[in-house]
Image: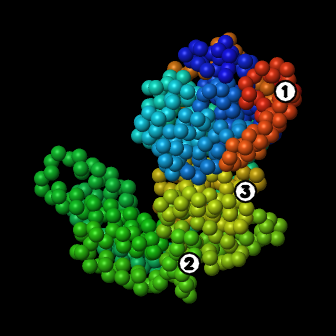
Amino acid sequence: MESQNTVSRQSETKGFDLSAGNTWIYPENYPVRQYQYNIVQSALYRNTLVCLPTGLGKTFIAAVVMYNFWRWYPYGKIIFLAPTKPLVAQQIDACYEIMGIPSVDMIELTGAVSQKKREVAWRKKRIIFATPQVFHNDLDRSIIPSHLIKCVVIDEAHKALGKHSYCECIKILSTQNQYFRILALSATPGNKLDNVHEVIQNLHISHLELRDENSIDIIPYVNKRKVDIILVPLSDELAAFKERYITIMDRHVKFLIQCNVLRGHTANISKGRVFYLLKEFKTKTDKSGNYGQVMKILNMLLTMYHAYELMIRHGLRAFRKFYETHSDKFWMHSEDQLRDLLRDIEVYLGPFPELFPNGDVSEMPENIVFGHNKFHKLKELLEHHFNNNNSDREDTRAIVFVEYRDIVNEVYILLLQSKPIIRPQMFVGQAGQKQKQQIKALEDFRSNRVNVLISTSIGEEGLDVGEVDLIICFDVSQHSPIRLVQRMGRTGRKRDGHIIVLVTDGKEHENLKSTLSRRDSLNNKILNTSNIFSSLYDNNPRMIPDQFTPECHKIHITVLPKTPNLKGKGKRKNVNKKNEASDVKQKENLPKKDIGQPSMMKFLTDGKCDEQNRDNRC
């Protein structure tokens, strides 16, 4: 038990260990990067939003900040929130490996853990890695000792919009505890300036640390990424089916043109345009005349144009599958031409192998039709990559990103035909893969047992997939530069990377160029606008008693083996004795001024400050 006079009693810093207040710890296990050092130093004092390109060490920054709050507040709790279960699992391992925080102090909490066990964990554990939904639910149920929370880290912070659990967590926690540090992490701050303002306000951010690939202190650590855009033409068969489908939609479009609701050629109208018209019509107060018929046609065309985009960008199987799952639409029975088209597409495509949950496939038919030239181009690009690299880079790997789960299945079947040069593995969300399968998929990819990961959006965000030389984007997310930034960030981490984006019609190509320019202009706007500072949080808690301005103490962290989960008191006692002996040995290596610091310092051995950092108090 800490002596009462060594622990702060001030409300803002209650529980702060006064004997540890003269220093903050920075690890020497890894090469010191000045931008990381500077960001950590800022984040200790202020609620900080850190935007760093993927692969430049956001998790490292989080681990160092968490470690210092764990050390300063011996009875405090630190929360790390990540949006998906695989990310939660990954981050707990990364933080252990970076800073050596004892595994016995940490726990992973997701919806798979029962509420009763979570309640015990919230009381007994000091560093909790959780999904925001679990944290939100448990705050609502008042099973979290929220007054003990001293630091909250939020990964993929750009999601903190509207009623997202991230926003609700901070809102609820702030009513119960005014004094905790927030560290928010993201590869990109948002889609547009308004979203960035909202994230800053929702997460009580008082300081921004924004970097992009052109930032002076980042450039030495960024590898080159070659980006190629390949325009894939429609096959003659797909083009013919497309023309038939346009004719089917045309009579509905003409009705809306006659009603002065819509203008333009049927082939050039977008789903987004129909959506906005529908939204506009719903708000009309005058619902007389042909209002009901217009609404019916707009609803039909919203479905039809979604299917049209699937056909052009993803192929005939995606188109047919979509209508299969929407066959209950009330208007389908009167669309004879559409039903004839779907039958003809089914005959043209022929049989497709069944895919089982474990990745096994039923008998492969000969000459499978894939229904879009993108599939053939994808296979050709991957075979070329592995044939060219297998001699000098046996560990070369690639990721294929696709928008929809059904396309993952198609790509997987396609690439199985190229074994053994291509060894594919699917990686999808919880609806298609359990967490154990997801973790195994990543492990197999990192260890090169498989060399192509076919992933939906779950693979875009933050996951450590090891070194990837080639990224192929099968499609382009229509609305979000964030998605593209995150996909591109999967390569070029330790060596130069190559990104290929497959696009079909001119519209998809234009959308890609627009997305890239929006990303660049948004970064510049945020970095150069003064308006953003009006959103910054004013009531930022210092979290360090006023009498302290801690100096940096650079130290080599010794990561002890994880505490084994042994049964029986006798065995556990022996393990504890061994650890204690190791702890004492390490404690002897500490400088005398740190001997009186809390027991967590036993995981460190001394190191000296770099000369270049002496001006920064090392």
The alpha-carbon separation of the residues under discs 1 and 2 comes to 59 Å
In the rendered image, which residue does mark 3 sit on? Answer: 467
Q: Amino acid at mark 2?
A: Val
Does residue 302 sit above or below 133 in this rendering?
A: below
Residue 326 place in picture, x, y as percent: 33, 68
Residue 251 place in picture, x, y as percent: 26, 70
Which badge, 2 or 3, is on the more N-terminal residue?
Answer: 2
399 left or right of 241? Answer: right
Q: Nearer the viewer, residue 57 or 444?
A: 444
Q: Nearer the viewer, residue 14 or 571?
A: 571
In the rendered image, which residue does mark 2 sit on? Answer: 361
Q: Quadrant of residue 522?
A: top right
Q: Quadrant of the N terminus?
A: top right
Q: Quadrant of residue 4?
A: top right
Q: Residue at image x 78%, y 70%? A: 390
Which badge, 1 or 2, is on the more N-terminal residue?
Answer: 2
Q: Amino acid at mark 3?
A: Glu
Residue 567 place in picture, x, y as percent: 67, 48
Does residue 192 sit above or below 367 in this rendering?
A: above
Q: Quadrant of residue 398?
A: bottom right
> Does the CB distance between marks 2 and 3 fall below 8 Å?
no
Q: Residue at image x 50%, y 78%? A: 354
Residue 302 place in picture, x, y as percent: 32, 61
Numbered disc total: 3
The alpha-carbon separation of the residues under discs 1 and 3 comes to 37 Å
Task: State the mark number for residue 590.
Answer: 1
Q: Nearer the viewer, residue 583 or 460?
A: 583
